[in-house]
Image (cartoon, rainbow, N blue to C red):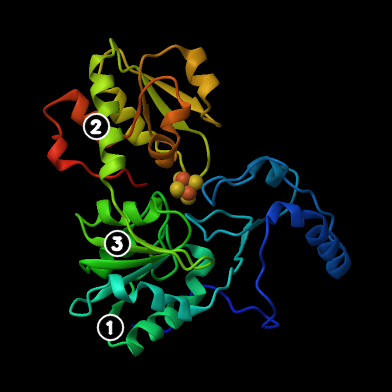
Amino acid sequence: MGTASCIPPCPDGGPPVSGRLKRRAPETAAALKEAGGYAVIISGDPCYGACDLATDALDLADVLIHFGHAPVDSRPGVIYEYVRFDFDPEIAENAIALLDPAQPVGLVTTVQHAHLTDAVAAVLEGHGFTVVVGDGNARTPCRGQVLGCSYATARAAGTSQFLYIGTGVFHAIGVGLATGGARVVALDPYTGVVEEADASRLLRRRFAQIEKAREAETVGGIILSTKTGQRREELARHLASLSPVADIICMQEVSPDSLLNLGYACYVNTACPRLAYDDQVRFPVPVLSPPEYEIVRGGIRDWDDYIIDEI
Ligand code: SF4
C-alpha cells in the first residue's frame, strides 16, 4: 500500500467542505474577488461530473475552476479544485464482520473521500487485513477512486473482495460487475450502514430491457453526448454501423421528453453509462448500454458475457 494521495491537503488543515457546492457560489465568488480582484462568472447549469465541463462559461473567461471532481481528461484552461468530504476512518470497523480476513481487501471510494483511503486502510490493517488500493489512471487519477463510468482502479487491485466507501450502492454493484463477480461490501461513511452489494436486481431489470428491445421494430437511436468527457464518437459510429436503420443522435442533455419527441422505439446510450442503469425508469422506451446492444444484435455478445458499460 502506498501513501501518496492525489488530493492536495487542505492548506490550513481546516474543516471539510460539505453541503451543496452550488449553494456556495456566492461566498466562493466573493472570496475570489476579495483575494485577487478577479472578475467572476458562475455557471448556473447543472453539472454531473468532470465529464460535464461548463465550456460555455469558459468561452466567457480566461480559466474555468471546476469544483468537486478529479479530471477525467486534460483540458487547457481548466483548474480542478478538489473538495474533501471527511468522515471518521474508524467507521470502517463496521464492515469487518462482512469481510473475509483470509482474503486481501480491495479498497475503493469516490473522489471526495479519496484523501482518507490510507487512514481507512490503516484501520483494516490494524485488524489483521491485507489491504490493496489500485493505482489511479487518466480517468480516475486518485488511488482507489471509482466513477460510475470507470472501475479500472478496482481491476488494478485484483482482489476477490472489496470495501467500497460511499453513499448508495451503484458504485459497489459496478465494482462487482466490472471485476467479474468480486464480493463488494458497501459502507456509508455518514450513517455507518454496511451491506453487501447485490447486482441481481439490476441484472434482472437490464435483462427485461434487452428483451423489450428485441421486440421493438427498430433499435434506431444511437445517443452521442456532446459533453466534454462523455463524447464517445467512435463508439457511436461503430454501433450505428451495426444496423442500416440506426441513426446517431447528438445531445447535450438526455431527457425523457427529448427521447419521446424523437420517436425511436429503442435507444443505445453512449453518454454517461448511469443514464441507462439508474434512469431507465424515467425513459419511455428501452435505453440500452453499448454491450447490451451487442447482445440484442446477436452474434456479438451473449447474455453470459454481460459487462457493465465503462468510458
Ligand atoms: S460519465 Fe457519468 S459516471 Fe462518469 S463522471 Fe460523468 S456523470 Fe459521472
Q: Is residue 120 above or below residue 43?
A: below
In the figure, is residue 138 to the left or right of 19? Answer: left
Q: Badge 2: few (under 14), some or many (20 or more) residues near its Cα, within 10 Å?
A: some
Where is residue 227 shown, x and y percent of the image? Answer: 53, 39
At x 88% / y 67%, what residue is drawn? Answer: 34
- Separation of residues labelled 2 and 3 (CA atoms): 22 Å
Q: Which residue is mark 3?
A: 184
Q: Secondary structure at mark 1?
A: loop
In the figure, is residue 138 to the left or right of 182? Answer: right
- Separation of residues labelled 1 and 3 (CA atoms): 15 Å
Badge 1 amino acid: Phe
Quarter holding the N terminus? bottom left
Q: Is residue 78 above or below residue 136?
A: above
Question: Does label 1 or label 3 sit earlier along the sequence?
Answer: 1
What's the mark number on residue 207?
A: 2
Determine the image quadrant of residue 127: bottom left
Where is residue 164 shown, x and y percent of the image? Answer: 38, 65
Question: Does label 2 or label 1 sit earlier along the sequence?
Answer: 1
Q: Secondary structure at mark 3?
A: strand
- Separation of residues labelled 2 and 1 (CA atoms): 37 Å
Q: Badge 3: few (under 14), some or many (20 or more) residues near its Cα, within 10 Å?
A: many
At x 46% / y 81%, what residue is drawn? Answer: 90
Q: Badge 1: few (under 14), some or many (20 or more) residues near its Cα, within 10 Å?
A: some
At x 40% / y 79%, what residue is drawn? Answer: 93
Q: Secondary structure at mark 2?
A: helix
What's the mark number on residue 129?
A: 1
Badge 2 amino acid: Phe
Verify CB contact (< 8 Å) between mark 2 and mark 3: no
Determine the image quadrant of residue 29: bottom right
